[in-house]
Image (tube, rainbow, N blue to C red):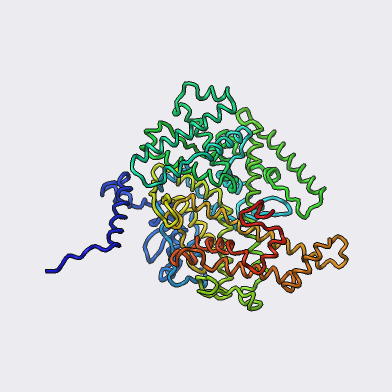
Amino acid sequence: MSMPVAPTLGDILRLEEQELNHDFGAEGACNDEESEQLEEVPEGFCVECKDQKAQVFCEQCQEDFCDVCGGMIHRTGKRRQHNLKALNDANATSEAVTAVDLADQEVEPGSTMDTDIHDVEAKDADEGEDSDGNSKGASEDIRMFGAMSVTFSAQSGRVETGSSGPSFAEWITERAKYIPLRLTLKERKYLRLLEAALNVSEYTDKIDVLMYGSKSKRIVAQIKELCAILSGLVLASDYKAGQSLFEERQFEDNEEFYQKIFEIGRRHKIMNPEKMRNEYGKLMYMLQDSQLSDVQGMLGFSAVAPIKTVYSVLESLGVTYVLEDEMVAVATKEIVAQGKARSQVQLEIKQKERAIEYLCKAYATHDCPAEVIRQCLYSIGDNHAYLRFNRDPCDRMLGYLTRLFDAQKSESEILSLAILYGRDGARLSHSHTNQFHYVRQTLTLWREIQHDMFMLWHHADSDLLSAKNTYRLKDTGQGLNRVQPCPRVSRSAHAILHRTQKAVGRWVGSAMIHLGDHNVPNALMFIDKYNQVSSILNPIVRVLEFLESHEAIARDVSGRNVSRSQRDVVRFIESSYGSIEQAKKLILADFFRSAFDGSGSDNFFDAGSCIDGRLTSAWNWCSSVEKKPYFNVFLLSGFVGFNGGPEGFS
């Protein structure tokens, strides 16, 4: 008779995890019949994600896919040889066919493709969208072009679209659906009150902890405490307004007021990622908890309202056709003074002011006053400024990479981009050519993400605040975090990745996107990670611009308008690095090597070439920049840190 085998620690932990997952899923569990019904794929839809229209058919798999899923599943291995045919549909494209025909795609051993596009709440994600197939297909076609067909001209200060892409009117109409509306003066006053209330709140400290007792009761108590603080601040700032709002009224009686003030905070953060760094997390987690069914019943009101966008405001007033006017491009362009004479800048300012006044007078109605149109135009202008600050540094770095480095061979050993596993902390091994393409595709992907950040942020907001999309409090190795699926963000991120893979033509490394796991627990963490791209690249671009300005000084033989300190800086750089051009190449070569070497994680399994690991490596390089031999050049340019003053400079 054999002796019973005692369970191992791994067996116990796996059992606990299964029980934990079962407990959290019990609320939304359904019987076997309902489960089978959920797994059925609607006719004409993708068999993988189940919520997008099928656009290609695989002859070997005998299944229909959307462009993104078809391209991802058939990107590597034997499936790469499968034949994909576009379906006979007016909106079908052959993107996936092109994706599997990309030449010389290289994937590292052991890397995996994340083809798990969550279908949780897939139907809920599409609620409110236009049911008309033609209009939906047209908007999908516009989104398909992405940042590749839209460029920003620093000289003209306006967004320009390529000849093969959508027109400016089509592009801005689609983008306006995600552009937050600029705050009014009254809304900014409410914003200051909200920031003050969140600053003193200890919401996450009291909620996201493991303790006995009813969590729902603690959530309701904390939400009511925050609302009470807000009420007191409003009453203190404007007694009459506060008295009319709160005299002899309960919390649920002021539901609209609380929805408005919380929506103001969310809207302000999207347009200003560097603001509300501590307060925004508390706000989103509080609103996330307020959507729980048991909390809703005890609280008595909903604290969540849709974010106001340019398109939603114009649509509610019935004047969306204002975006089709060609003068919108002039009225919303950003005036960039760099490289222009003062007279030209003044002329552009007057042209912009005239265009704004013309649009306000031409399209103002009884329901839509001119001030609302002016506010929408200013919001679109803010969008252009956002793109210039967050997306354009990726363009600049891509320009430096292709202009100063050859993809096939290195200029010298010190300027080689080749990396070797184990050397200088690298966790990848790439030749010079592979590393060149690896850096190029990563910067291109970052550019695409920054271009569509407003859309991703809106999807993240929906994922976080969905009543059906619950979270689990889990120790991820960096403390307790809220682990939650991100179906909308996942779908959009994979679409952007697919678009980037088509653009670069060759893919080096893994294409896995971490979402809803211990690496990126929820959509808020995903947004926070990619908001740091500009914080990393902008200071480097500023240093390179500093070197280029002194390079012009070195070429100026006359030296009439050159100060003594500037000449000293030029002599110092030339004596230390040989030339200013060489100093630029040394900085860039080290950045392209060390910031894209798969390092920076706590262990080997979480590092590497996955989509999120690339950004982790860049942050790891930032943390050690003061040890670099060229750090004195950073200091000479005024650099104080990647998280310092404006753009990291004093």
Q: Identify the residue shown where x is 56% and y is 37%.
A: 196
The quadrant in which residue 368 appears is: top right
Residue 55 visible in the snapshot? no
Say if 273 sits above or below 149 in the image. above
Residue 30 visible in the snapshot? yes
Q: Identify the residue shown where x is 48% and y is 70%.
A: 107
Along the viewing direction, whichever of 106 and 618 lies nearer the viewer:
618
Along the viewing direction, whichever of 179 and 585 lies nearer the viewer:
585
Quadrant containing the N terminus is: bottom left
Q: Which residue ends up furthest to the left in the rendered image?
A: 1
Say if 378 sits above or below 422 in the image. above
Number of numbered discs present?
Answer: 0
Along the viewing direction, whichever of 252 and 89 lies nearer the viewer:
252
Quick check: 349 left or right of 184? right
Q: Position of residue 341 (x, y in %)?
A: 81, 51
Q: Position of residue 50 (x, y in %)?
A: 39, 53
Quick check: 76 left or right of 36? right
Q: Position of residue 327 (x, y in %)?
A: 69, 43
Q: Position of residue 3 (x, y in %)?
A: 15, 67
Along the viewing direction, whichever of 235 and 292 lies nearer the viewer:
235
Q: Identify the residue shown where x is 52% and y is 25%.
A: 245
Say if 204 sits above or below 368 in the image. below
Quick check: 7 left or right of 130? left
